[in-house]
Image (cartoon, rainbow, N blue to C red):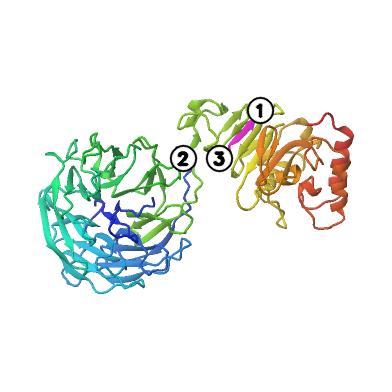
Amino acid sequence: MSRDLSHRLCVPRLQLQEDRRQAISRACIETLESRELFSFAAATNYPVGTNPQEIVTADFNGDGKLDLATVNTGSNNVSVLLGTGAGGFAGAQHFAAASHAAASDPSWLAVADFDGDANPDLAVLFDMYGVYILKGNGNGTFRAPVRHGPGAMIATGIAAGDFNADHKMDLVYTDSDPFSGVGGYVTLMLGNSQGGFTDAMSAAQPSYGLSVGDPNGDGKLDVVTAWWTMLGNGDGTLRMATENGGFSGNPDYYPRAIAIGEMTRDGAADLVLAAANVQVLPGLGNGQFSGSVLAGNETTYYTAVATADFNGDGELDAVATGSAADVWLGNGDGTLRDPVAVTTGTSPSGVASGDLNGDGRPDIAVTNGGSNNVSVILNDGNWASKTYVGPTGGNWSTASNWSPSGAPTAADSVVITGTSVNLSASATVARLTIDGGATLTVAQNGARVLRTGPITIGGTSKLNLNDNDLIVDYTGASALGSWNGSAYTGVTGLIARGYNFSAWDGSGLVTTMTDAHSGLTTLAPAEAADVLGITGNQTSVWHGQVLDATTVIVKYTYAGDVNLDGLVDASDYGTIDNYYQFPGTTGYTNGDFNFDGVIDAGDYGLIDNSFQLQGPAL
C-alpha cells in the first residue's frame, strides 16, 4: 500500500559527463547549463508504473539522446523511457527496484556511473531497506538490483557525487525520524567503482530537503539539507558550516525541496527553496546563506524544485511541482517573477529538465503520481522579456506599463495580450507577439518604423501600422511567406488576413488610413534583398535602418508599387505585365496586389487606380 507523498521532499541528481570526476548537483532536475508568454508546448503524457515519484534524465542506451527514468512507489519498480531525440519517447520498460520482497514504496532515485563502465546506473532509496543499485547495461536495460548501505528511517533524499576525489561515484542520502518528523541522519557512502560502497558515515541532523554542490567554493562537494550545510573535507567526511548550519528562520516551515544555482550573478552559489513558496537565499560564498525561510501554509507545499535557464536570457529560472508545474523566471538579482503554471497530469510530483528534442533549450518532464504517467513539456523558445501590463490604450513608451518595468529595447521579446497599446515613435524589439484579441497601433506619422525579429499576431489580434512601415528580421527560411494553394503564409499572410478586399478590417497586419480603404494605398511586403538589390553579406540603409539580405520590408505605399519606391510608374507596370503571362505566379512583388493568389484583372484595376490618383511619393 503506497503512502501519501504529497509533502515529499526533493532529491538532487548527478548529470553524467565524459569527465565523471565532476559531480554536478541537481534537485529533481537535469539542468543544461510576467504575466509571461509561457513558452512551453502542451504536455504529451507517457504511461509508466503506478504512483511515479522521482524522475531523472540520462542517456541510458548510448545513442546520444536523453532518456527518462522514474521510480514508482505503487508498483515497486523503475520505469525507463528511451528518447527519440525529437521530444518523443518509446513505451516504458519496467525493472524491479529491490531484490527483497519486504522492501516497498521506493520514492527516491539518483543516476551516476557507479561501476566505472561508462554506462549510467540507478540508485533507488527505500524506507528501512537502504539503497539498491541497478547497474546499466548501456542499451537501456538494467541488471537485477543489489542492496547496499544501512537502512534509512523515512527516506527523504538521495544524491551522487565524488566526495573524496578518487574519481569514483559516492552516494549521500537523508532520512527523518518517523516519530518526531524532525530528527534524522545524513548518510554518506563511498563508492569503490565496482558498484559497491564502503565506509558509511552518518551524521545526526534534521534532514528534510537535500542538494549537493560547492557553496563555499573550495572545489569540494558539500551537502545542503533543510536548515543545515555540511561542508565536504574532500576526503569523504563532512563538517558543519556553522553552529546553526548557515540558515535562519522558523523550523516549522521546512523547505520541501532545495536546488543550488547561481541566481544573483555574484559568483557564489545560491539556494532556491520550495515549501509553500519558492524563494532564493543568496549565498555568501562560505557555505552560509542570507535571508530567512518564509513561513507558509503546508497544504500548498511544493514537492520538487530545480533551476534552468528556460527563457534563454542568461539568468537561471526555477521550476517546481505542486498542484502543477510552476515556472518562476529569474531576474538575476535573486528575485523571481510571478509564477506561471503548465498543465500536467494528476498529482505531479518529481520534475526533471533537459534538452529532450535537441533544439538547445531545456524542456521539462514531470511525474504524475495520480495518473501514473510522465508529462513531457517541450520548450518552444518563444519567451517574453517584456509583457504589457498597463491600461487599455496605454502608451508603449511608459516604463510602468511593462513587466519588468521599462519600455522595450532592441533586446526584448515583447508580448501584448488582450488589450490595446499605442506606439507613437519608432521602435525596435527582438520579437513581437500580439495575442488574445490585442491591438498595437502605430500612430499616424508616415515616418515611423517598427522593427522586430519573429512576429506573431494570433487570433483576432492586430498590428495597425497606419501610414508607417514594418521591418521583420529573420534567420533560416524567409519570413515573407508564400501562397500554399489556398492562402498566403508568413508576413504576406498577416497582410492578407487584414486586407479583406480593401476593407482592412480583418486580423493580422492592417492600416486604417482612408486611402487604404478606398484601395489607393496598401501595405506592401517584399524581401529587402529584392527591392534594395543586396546579396550575401551586403547591407543597405532604408528609412535610417541598416538592412541585410535576411530582412522583410512592409511599406505603406500605393497599391501596385512593386519596387517599394513610393510611386506607381512604368517599372511597376513592367513587372505585372511580365508575370501576368505566367499563370500560377503569386506574390505582391510579382503583381498580386489584392492577395488572392492570382494575378488578374483585379490587380490591374488597383495599379491603374493608383497610377491615376497617386500624390507625392510615400
State the quadrant of the C terminus.
top right
Vertical position of residue 56 compared to residue 343: above or below: below
- Label 1 vs label 3, nearer the camera: 3
- Kindly identify the residue that appears in the image at 42 percent across and 65 percent down: 64
- Label 3 vs label 2, nearer the camera: 3
Residue at mark 3: 430
Residue at mark 1: 443
- Kindly identify the residue that appears in the image at 55 percent across and 35 percent down: 410
Amino acid of disc 2? Glu
Q: Secondary structure at mark 2?
A: loop
- Magenta segment: 436-442
Q: Earlier in the sequence, mark 2 or mark 1?
A: 2
- Judging depth in this view, the residue of 453 and 489 nearest the camera is 453
Q: Secondary structure at mark 1?
A: loop
Residue 343 is a magenta residue: no
Q: Earlier in the sequence, mark 1 or mark 3?
A: 3
Asked if the residue at tag 3 contacts the one at tag 1, i.e. Cβ–Cβ closer than 8 Å, the answer is: no
Residue at mark 2: 36
Q: Earlier in the sequence, mark 3 or mark 2?
A: 2
Amino acid of disc 1? Ala
Left or right? Give the position of 544 relative to 357. right
Cα distance in 3D space between marks 3 and 2: 16 Å
- Judging depth in this view, the residue of 559 and 535 nearest the camera is 535
Amino acid of disc 3? Ala
Indicate the quadrant where residue 558 lies. Answer: top right
